[in-house]
Amino acid sequence: MLVTPSAHSIDPQTGALAGNTGRYQKRLSDLRGLYADSDAFEHAAQEDGERVVYTVEDVRPEASAGDLIFGTTFMEPGRIGSEFFMTRGHIHATANRPETYYGESGSGLMLMESPDGQTNILEVHPRTMVYVPPLWIHRSVNTGNTPLVMSFCYPVDSGQDYEVIARSGGMAVRIMADGNGWASVPNTGYRPRTQTEVDAILATQA
Ligand SMILES: O=P(O)(O)OC[C@H]1O[C@](O)(CO)[C@@H](O)[C@@H]1O
Ligand SMILES: [Fe+2]
């Protein structure tokens, strides 16, 4: 069945995506357990747990395979303790589905981790296209003091698996403020995946 082509303007400052079919927001209270400093988190959540940390708008086609989902992510600047605001992070449920992210405004980074625990970090700036290849767990981090807005695109049959990060006690590194910039520091609660867990991820490829 033919789908009608469409064009969608993106506001690089707000991430507003014309003609979006979906939108969701993650509030501070939705992000419990992500940050190293749980006291600082509880303090911030008590002050304003309803505070929106990031907003995602997207266009989702009806097709079940071969098509694309595209949209925008708007991330507020901020920190819990010295750890920068970040998305929950995930691997695609069909793990060999890739994704692109394009910097619209602000600055941050894409924190990526392979199933066997290698870390790869790429900075995202306006007019930078970041490629997240198949099989990489990915999380966006706003390391600036202004909103980070990115547009993204990924296959419609990707899905998101959030448990992969929870099971390993978070990602292997955390992104912390360091002077005027950022530093990656080891996550002391990290439990590397076993070979059985790695094999289970690889088995979700299609
Ligand atoms: O799904 P998370 O990890 O909360 O982060 C949101 C980002 O990831 C995506 O789900 C795309 O993979 C986008 O919707 C958005 O850019
Ligand atoms: Fe993704």
Image (cartoon, rainbow, N blue to C red):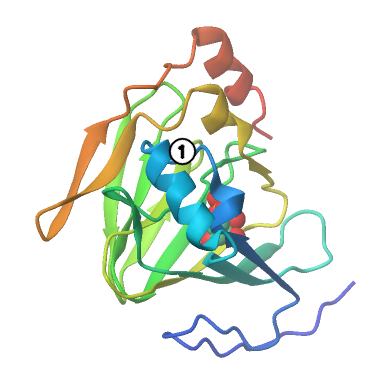
**What element does badge 1 sit on?**
loop
On the image, the x and y values in percent for residue 28 come to 54, 56
Residue type pointed to by label 1: Trp
Q: Is residue 172 above or below residue 48?
A: above
Furthest toward the right, the residue is 1
Q: Residue 167, located in which quarter of the rendered image?
A: top right
On the image, the x and y values in percent for residue 199 come to 57, 15
Pointer 1: residues within 10 angstroms few (<14), some, or many (20+)?
many
What residue is at 49 percent from the left and 10 percent from the top? 194
Does residue 188 appear in the picture of this structure? Answer: yes
Residue annotated with mark 1 = 136
What residue is at 35 percent from the left and 62 percent from the top? 78
Q: Is residue 106 above or below residue 196?
A: below
Out of 141 and 179, give the one closest to the viewer. 179
Q: Is residue 69 left or right of residue 131?
A: right
Task: Quarter of the image for the C terminus: give it.
Answer: top right
Q: Is residue 51 left or right of residue 140?
A: right
Out of 48 and 69, give the one closest to the viewer. 48
Number of callouts:
1
Q: Is residue 67 above or below residue 202?
A: below
What residue is at 65 percent from the left and 22 percent from the top? 203
On the image, the x and y values in percent for residue 127 come to 31, 76
Out of 129 and 197, give the one closest to the viewer. 197
Picture quadrant of ligand 1 = bottom right
Tell whether circle 1 marks a residue whose Cβ is less than 8 angstroms from ligand 2: no
On the image, the x and y values in percent for residue 1 come to 90, 71
Does residue 99 appear in the picture of this structure? Answer: no
Q: Is residue 170 left or right of residue 82?
A: right
Furthest toward the left, the residue is 179
